[in-house]
Image (spheres, rainbow, N blue to C red):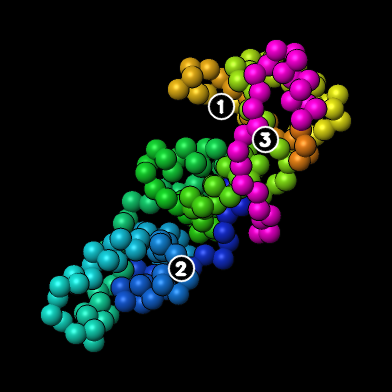
Amino acid sequence: MRVREFMTTNVITVSSKTPVVDARKYMQVHKIRRLPVVDKGKIAGMVSDRRVAEASPSAATTLSVWEINHLLSKMTIAEIMSKKVITCPPDTTAESALALAQQHGVGSLPVVDEKGHLVGIVTTNDFVYRIMNPLLGIGKPGTRIHVYDCGDTNKIEEVVRFIGKAELNVVAIHVDDSIERDSRDLIVQVDTEDASALIGDLTNRGFKVAIRERQFWPITS
């Protein structure tokens, strides 16, 4: 999956000349924590709700609301924005983009084209919904099965073969490296609410199997 497939393209932005008080309103209205700063179509910086809060007078101030807003209206985003912006192109793979965000400790990545123009943005929530949720089968019906000590190719192949014999389909699958048990376990979700027959077959074959607790609710967006 590439970033262009799940990035937000209708990005709320501000310019470096935007008053801080206006940026704060945009964040509140749109319920966002970060605003890309765009000047002449190109990314110039980023401003977070934390930076806006730091620029605002403390709760202990004796200033009135009118006086606070007046001060913030005089201060522009250029004075508080971060000019060091970590970006990625739209063809970046999802895993590379996530690694880049983690490496630099940022919660969002503006997506820019070859000319430096902002074309989208991806956030931590995007990675969760588009990568983690499918990996964990969240939002999809079925049963998740935990097969212990099943991380090598031959064992995984055998489990999948049993699933095929049961005429079931794999909804999600991944290998879980357990530090606690010092083992590699297979987590597989199959498209049935009753996996007892499959679990019985796997157990008889010598696998240690358990149903993995999960909560299901349909995801519509």
Which SS class for mark 1? strand
- Where residue 50 sits, quadrant-wise, is bottom left
Nearest-to-viewer mark from 2 and 1 = 1
Q: Which residues are magenta?
A: 196-221
User: Does the magenta portion include 205?
Assistant: yes
For the residues labelled 1 and 3, say whether their Cβ atoms are less than 8 Å apart.
Answer: no
Residue 117, horizontal then vertical, whole percent: 50, 58
Which SS class for mark 3? strand
Task: From the image, tell me which residue sits under label 3.
Answer: 144
Residue 4, horizontal then vertical, whole percent: 61, 51
- Which residue is drawn at the image coordinates 23% and 71% (left, top)? 56
For the residues labelled 2 and 3, say whether their Cβ atoms are less than 8 Å apart.
Answer: no
Q: Earlier in the sequence, mark 2 or mark 1?
A: 2
- Where residue 94 sits, quadrant-wise, is top right
Task: From the image, tell me which residue sits under label 2.
Answer: 31
Q: Earlier in the sequence, mark 2 or mark 3?
A: 2
Amino acid type of disc 2?
Lys
Question: Between marks 2 and 3, how big is the CA–CA gap?
Answer: 34 Å
Amino acid type of disc 3?
Arg
Residue 176 disc label: 1
Question: Between marks 2 and 1, how big is the CA–CA gap?
Answer: 34 Å
In what quadrant of the picture does the N terminus appear?
top right
Label 3: how many residues lie within 10 Å, few (<14), some (14-19) or many (20+)? many
The image shows residue 71, relative to residue 174, as above or below, that is below
The image shows residue 171, relative to residue 32, as above or below, that is above
